[in-house]
Amino acid sequence: MPKAVLLSLLALTAVTVFHLTTFVLLLVPVLTAALVGYRRLLARRPYATCRPCRGTGYRRSALLYRSNGRCPDCTGIGERARPGARLLNIH
């Protein structure tokens, strides 16, 4: 390989590493802030309204007309734990 090609590849690698390092240094604080914010949200409101039953705890049957039953997703409570609430033991 000619010397000019090797030098250009070396320069391209250096620029790529520089940009990747800059990207990671910018990405880490943004992700950390997002996780801290979500953790605070979980501390205040660990449960969310169940979407399938709209918070009522009951759902209509898909097969039988006018047939109601307890919502299997929230077990009739009307609220479900937010993602991460059990992982962080907040509830």
Image (cartoon, rainbow, N blue to C red):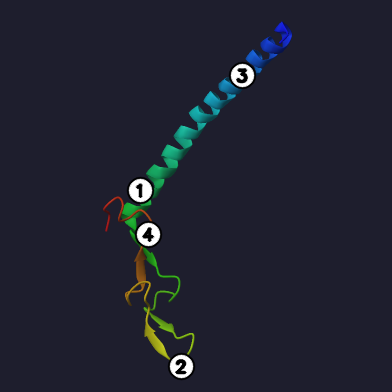
**Amino acid type of the residue tagged 2 in the rendering:** Arg
Comes first in the chain, label 4 or label 2: 2
Q: Which residue is mark 4?
A: 82
Comes first in the chain, label 3 or label 2: 3
Q: Where residue 47 appears, x then y in whole percent?
A: 34, 63
**Amino acid type of the residue tagged 3 in the rendering:** Thr
Q: Where residue 31 appears, x then y in whole percent?
A: 45, 39
Residue visible at 37% across and 59% down in the picture = 82
Q: Which residue is mark 2?
A: 66
Q: Is residue 56 above or below residue 91?
A: below
Q: Secondary structure at mark 4?
A: loop
Image quadrant for the N terminus?
top right
Q: Secondary structure at mark 2?
A: loop
Q: Which residue is mark 1?
A: 39
Report how far apart the C-alphas of labels 3 and 4 lie in the structure: 43 Å
Q: Which residue is mark 3?
A: 13
Comes first in the chain, label 2 or label 1: 1
Q: Are there few (<14), some (14-19), or many (20+) residues within 10 Å of tag 1? A: some
**Amino acid type of the residue tagged 1 in the rendering:** Arg
Residue at the far front: name it: 1
